[in-house]
Image (cartoon, rainbow, N blue to C red):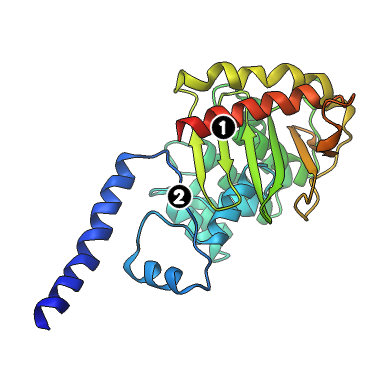
Amino acid sequence: MNILVLAAIGLAVVLPTVGFVLRRSLPYQKRPALHEASFGALVFQIIRWPYRWPDSEVERIRRLMFANQTLGEISLSWNVSEPVATVARLARNGNFQRADEVASRLRAPDDPATVLLRAYVKQQLGQPDVACEVLRPLASRQDVEARLRLWAFAGLRELGEQPGPEVADEMLGLVVETEVDGGVDSLAMYPDGQVRLVLHNGHITFYDSSDARLRDLVAAVGAPAQAVYLDVPLAEPPSEKPRGDDFRFTFLTPAGSRSVTVDRRSFGQGSPYTELFLATGALFKGLAALT
């Protein structure tokens, strides 16, 4: 009996450790989620099994596809290293004056995560004009991930500043959603070549633009998206997820989201979104083949 107990304890320690090492060596992979209330979720939380994320984390990652979070939501949600972590911790505790003092001495003030955090602190100190000054350079940068620019523009709108007409309608991303087996599959793509896929069963795939295998499929989405997105009025995607035959396209721009829900049965029947549906479907299949 003692041998069995020791063996069980050994497995409980060794397996999560091996899994953690494997996960660190494979940054892009699918990870099925667990229902938080299930027995399996409890067991895996205790031994910290690294391959499974709870449903709440899967949903958080899905929502980040839209890059429309408030300054507080996004700037306090990231894991950052010191000394930026100290600024974030002070801000979470409501000590904004001290957070501002520490932020003023940071050596890399132009780091995007730092910029968003500094803008949030200035906002909370009642200095919206200064917060806007902090955000404008990030919003105009072409050397950063598209979502970072979108978060900067979202922050500016939150502070009361709308983007200029020369950039307001620039398409910086597209999120496609459709119901599958009672859940929702969500596919996001950005002009920098980044792709995010969150499936209804919790599987998550991150595709990096440095991988050339899907480059043509990602680029092929651009033309049909550009052809229709300006016809969609500015509107945030509904809080409820698409159901039945609904197929939702949400175009991400500096002025905000442009969201439209289309009946998939209209594709091929004169719908202006048919070509976009086919292009995103081809990208989905290509991404699935890689994983």
- Per the image, the residue denoted by label 1 is 195
Q: Quadrant of residue 186?
A: top right
Which amino acid type is marked by label 2? Arg
Q: Is residue 22 left or right of residue 64?
A: left
- What element does badge 2 sit on? loop
Which amino acid type is marked by label 1? Val
- CA distance separating discs 2 and 1: 16 Å
The mark found on residue 31 in the picture is: 2
Name of the residue lying farthest toward the bottom: 1
Quadrant including the C terminus: top left
Q: Is residue 274 left or right of residue 177?
A: right
Q: Is residue 185 above or below residue 133?
A: below
Question: Dot 1, how many residues are within 10 Å of its Cα: few (below 14), some (14-19), or many (20+)?
Answer: many
Quadrant including the N terminus: bottom left
Q: Is residue 164 left or right of residue 95?
A: right
Question: Dot 2, how many residues are within 10 Å of its Cα: few (below 14), some (14-19), or many (20+)?
Answer: some
- Image spot of residue 245 (x, y percent): 80, 44
- Image spot of residue 156 (x, y percent): 73, 40
Q: Can the viewer see residue 75?
A: yes
Q: Earlier in the sequence, mark 2 or mark 1?
A: 2
Q: Quadrant of residue 162?
A: top right
- What element does badge 1 sit on? strand
- Image spot of residue 202 (x, y percent): 54, 52
Of 146 and 131, nearer the camera is 146
Of 87 and 101, nearer the camera is 87
